[in-house]
Amino acid sequence: MDILQPVYTEKTECQDCYKCVRECPSKAILVENNHAAIIPELCVSCGHCVLVCPSKAKRVRDDLGRAKQLISLGEKVVVSLAPSFKSEFHDTKPEQLISAIKKLGVWAVSETAIGADIVSSYTAVQLQDSRKGNKTLQNGKQQKLFISSACPAAVEYIKKYYPDYSAYIQDCGSPLLSHCRFLKKNLGSEIKIIFIGPCIAKKREADSWEEIDLAISFSDLRRWFSEKNIMPALETPGDGESFVPFNSAKGALYPIEGGMIESVNKYTGLEGVNTMAVSGLKNFEQVLANLDNDNLSEPLFLEFLSCQGGCIAGPLGNQADSTALKNLSIKKYAQNLPDTLNTGFDRIQAVLPVAQVQREDFTEEQIQTALRSVGKFSPADEMNCGGCGYDTCRSFSKAMLAGRAEKSMCVSYMRKLAHKKANGLIRAIPSGAVIVDKNMGIIECNEIFAKLLGPEITAMYEAKPGLEGADLSKIVPFYRFFQDVIFEEGLDLLEREVKEGNYTYHVTVFVIEKGESAGGVIQDITDPQMRKGRIVSQARKVISKNLSVVQQIAFLLGENAAETESILNSIIESFGGDFGNGDDDE
């Protein structure tokens, strides 16, 4: 567990469901000893795993304590407030929220959207230069493809996993970095800046740039308000409660999909420039597929946001409200703001430093060996079910080779393995054993069970080992015991002695899954003294030497190992009597 990273796993809470593996767009998850941990070098801090983890094992680094420390040290703290604040605190006026934040000990509050306006003005100039043929790449070719640098998670994702497109990412700083440098220049270099918003990746920015002291979330802010008994919606702000040094313009639209494009358009217009807004990291691949700068006839600007729907859907914001309502609240707030700000700002040229991910190359022989290790011997065996979290069996095999995945993650492999072990145990039991479903169809039985029922059933078993699908009600007269255990509430175990012709059988029936299946163990006790000690001894060996197998049976059938073991123990007890451990009869 690396709690110094923006996102980490609380391993004790991880339920090894692999949902994070399945959902992570960068597959930055390492599964080891049945627990999923985040690989910092591969993670882009999008926070999607935090949202989807059912056991809440994915955690976000808590920086609220550091924020409080800055206040307690008497630092001149300025809050850079994300433009999505209006969708988060939709029932609160801006001046009320400013007043509430300042009650925490903050010196001033400013809109991060000012930085967005700085980025918009710079982007507009770049795009117009490209339209005129004045924007070139390092290789001397004209740049026609532009990718926004506003979203740190999107920038990191492209630079790590689509490095061929890194050259097309804007070289201007993100809205947050631009805003912080603007604040330091205008309010003094000694100020400390705390970003507040719904974004985890801003913590990554704060770790990378000295101008940003730290980043906390809207949920952190609510927690802070609660600790201080502050209710923003009930604040009565004074006349001086306003954003410093002034309000933003249409940069306030950045948190919604297409908002950056609309803001850029207000500065110089986008005539002759094609634009496209894309949100959700998993959608990037389709957009970038075969996209070639040299084949574009006109400039193309791609607004990339990592969160589906935009920043208003950020992982550390309010997830209860609909995205539509959040979108509308942002648009309504921006309606009353000017189209542009003074374009005389210093333009920040900076790109988030990201190390390119070195992709592992494996030979076809290595991949096939890995596939065979999980029972995939031909393309027909490659189910590509996605149960392991990877889209294809080949992707899973590569993850195993890279040390990021374990064989136990393959559901079909583990099911087959458990089934083999279960069959092995059933056949090793020194008595007749059978498992049936609720319709009395046999799921599995051993050879001893067939032999106890006579030559006709034995012949059927030899023709089809296990008798899968056979109707128990047509084979034994005591099938109703199984029906009773499966369907009767409160009845989980039933033991009876049954006479059938010249034979007497001891029948033990136990529930496996209520309403679905049951198991039975049948012994021939026609001669009570015959082989009794051997049965006890062999059953004890089955339990003592095959506990792991018992657990696999329980896993296969949906029950816990302890319950399965207790049932086998009851069989021993029913035959133990005066024979002790049965060693004398072995």
Image (tube, rainbow, N blue to C red):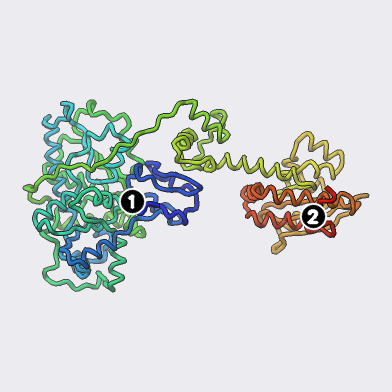
Residue 99 in the image: state x and y as whole percent. 19, 69
Residue 155 in the image: state x and y as whole percent. 26, 42
> Quick check: 51 above or below 353?
below
Of residues 259 and 346, the one nearer the viewer is: 346
Say what amino acid the circle numbered 2 marks: Asn
In this picture, residue 176 sits left or right of residue 38:
left
Quarter where residue 471 is shown: top right
What residue sits right under mark 1 in the picture? 5
In this picture, residue 425 sits left or right of residue 85:
right
> Quick check: 437 above or below 296?
below
Residue beneath the point at 35% across and 55% down? 60
Residue 581 disc label: 2
Say what amino acid the circle numbered 1 marks: Gln
Q: Residue furthest right?
A: 502
Q: Residue furthest front?
A: 584
Mark 2 → mark 1, Cα distance in angstroms: 56 Å
Residue 339 in the image: state x and y as whole percent. 13, 51
Residue 240 in the image: state x and y as whole percent. 11, 68
